[in-house]
Image: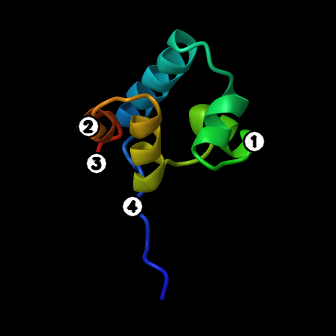
Amino acid sequence: MQQRRQVVRRPLEQEALLLHLRAMRKEHSKTQAQVAKAINLSRSQYTALEGGRSMFTFDHLVSLALFYHQSISTFLLLGGL
């Protein structure tokens, strides 16, 4: 049986996370396609996440934290988990 993934459900925390992710991506001079490839998503899937049209899972947040060499707790707190 596949394990259920927890998603971000709080709009204010999600907005903070989205702003943080855009800033991090631009600070590291990465495109959405580059970030998507690094965390094993399609560009359209990542664009939907960063644009707030799709919800982040715990796995997404962990992958992003590792990609940006950030504390996982920072991403979890921003994501409201």
Q: Amino acid at mark 1?
A: Ser
Q: Which residue is mark 2?
A: 77
Image point 35% across, 40% down: which residue? Answer: 79
Residue 20: quarter of image: top left
Mark 4 vs 2, N-terminal side: 4
Kind of element beneath mark 4: loop
Mark 4 vs 3, N-terminal side: 4
The answer, for residue 4, to whether it is visible in the render is: yes
Q: Which residue is mark 3?
A: 81
Q: Is the residue under label 2 in contact with that under label 3 (CB below 8 Å)?
A: yes
Q: Is the residue under label 1 in contact with that under label 2 (CB below 8 Å)?
A: no
Q: Amino acid at mark 4?
A: Gln
Q: In the image, is 49 to the left or to the right of 57?
A: right
Q: Which residue is mark 4?
A: 6
Q: Which residue is mark 1?
A: 44
Kind of element beneath mark 2: helix
Kind of element beneath mark 3: loop
Query: Gap between marks 3 and 1, in whole Å?
Result: 24 Å
Q: Return the residue nearer the eye: 29 or 6.
A: 29
Kind of element beneath mark 1: helix
